[in-house]
Image (cartoon, rainbow, N blue to C red):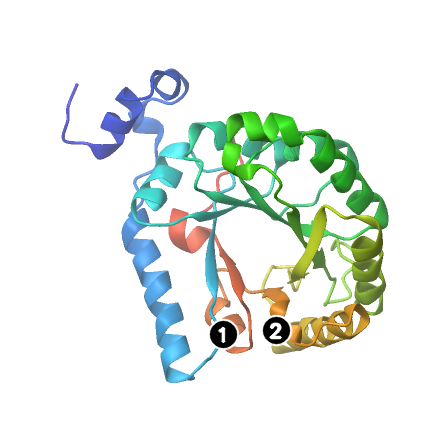
Amino acid sequence: SSSSSSSSSSVRSNPVMAEAAPASAVPDVDVAGNLGRVRAALEETHATKSLTHTTRLVAVSKTKPVELLQAAYDAGQRDFGENYVQELAEKAPEMPLDIRWHFIGHLQSNKAKVLCAIPNLAVVETVDTEKLALELEKRWVALADERAEKDPSSKGRVLSVFIQVNTSGEESKSGVEPPDAAPLAAFITENCANLKVAGLMTIGMPDYTATPENFECLKKCRSDVAERLGLPDENVLELSMGMSSDFALASEMGSTNVRVGSTIFGARNYNK
C-alpha cells in the first residue's frame, strides 16, 4: 500500500481501525492548518484587546474519525470535546491518556456510569440538575478503581463540572435558568464531595451562535455563583462560551474555554 498518504500509515499501525475505516473514508481535512489558524485568531484577540485571562481551545470532535483527532493531537491539541457518551467511550481508549476529554453534550443520568469509567475525563460541562450531579458523584466514586487501573495517575482526582445555563430562554435548550445557577452550584458543593464546580457553560441561540447578551448573562451568573459559594474572586470559575462562529468575540468577553468543531475538523457528519 502507498506510504505517501499519512492517513494510511496511521490506519496500518492500528489494525482495529483498518478494519473499521479504510483510509479512503477519512475526510481530507487540513486539521493542523485549521488548528493553527484558530489558535492564531485567539492569540491575536488576546494581544489586540490586551486580555489578561487565558482561553483554552477545546477541539469538538463529535462524529469525527479518530484519525482526524490524532492529527489534531499530533499538532499539539490536548483538550477534546465530545457530545455523545457512547462515542466518547469508544474513542477514549484508542487515544493517548494525556488527552483531557470534555463532555459537552446533553447527559442523561443513566449514561453517567459509562462516562465516569473514562480515566481522563477532565470535565462534564453540561450539569443542569441535582439528580445528574448526584448520579455523577455516585458513579465517579464507584468507578475510581476501574479508572485507576487504566491510568494510575487518575487516582484521587475529583471530577470538574460546569453548570450549564440556558442564557437564551430557548425551551429547546438544556441548562438551568440563570437564577437557578447559584443554588445548583451550592447544592453540588454541599452534597457532592468528589465533584468540583469549576465553571459555567452556555450554548447560546438555537443556531448555536451566541449574542453578547448571552455572554453577559453567563458572566452575571458567574458572579452570583461566586458570591453564593463565598469565593474571594469570581475569576477562579471558568466561562465556557463561544463556538466556531463566535469564539473570538467570546474570548474577548471573558471566555476561558471555547468549543470549536467544524472550523477545525470540517463540517459535521451525522450519517455515521
Which x, y percent locates residue 46? 41, 77
Determine whether, in the image, residue 256 is placed left or right of residue 196.
left
Disc 1 element: loop
Determine whether, in the image, residue 93 is placed left or right of residue 129.
left
Q: What residue type is labelled 2?
A: Asn
Give the camera-side residue of 40 and 122.
122
Q: In this view, does 233 lie above or below 171?
A: below
Task: Let me know if residue 99 appears in the view.
Answer: yes
Q: Is residue 228 above or below residue 175?
A: below
Q: What residue type is labelled 1?
A: His
Which x, y percent locates residue 224? 77, 74
In the picture, which quadrant includes the N terminus?
A: top left
Which x, y percent locates residue 90? 53, 27
Q: Is residue 110 above or below residue 98?
A: above
Q: In this view, does 196 lie above or below 40?
A: above
Residue receiving disc 1: 53
Disc 2 element: helix
Question: Which residue lies at the image location 38% right of the left edge and 23% below the top edge?
Answer: 21
The quarter holding residue 175 reads: bottom right
Disc 1 + disc 2, Cβ < 8 Å:
yes
Task: Let me know if residue 266 appears in the view.
Answer: no
Disc nearer the start of the sequence (1/2): 1
Give the camera-side residue of 227 and 62.
227
Question: Which residue lies at the image location 51% right of the left edge and 31% below the top edge?
Answer: 151
CA distance separating discs 1 and 2: 9 Å
Question: Which residue lies at the image location 74% right of the left edge and 40% below the top edge?
Answer: 136
Label number found at residue 235:
2
Determine whether, in the image, residue 59 is placed left or right of residue 35.
right
Determine whether, in the image, residue 240 is placed left or right of residue 269.
right
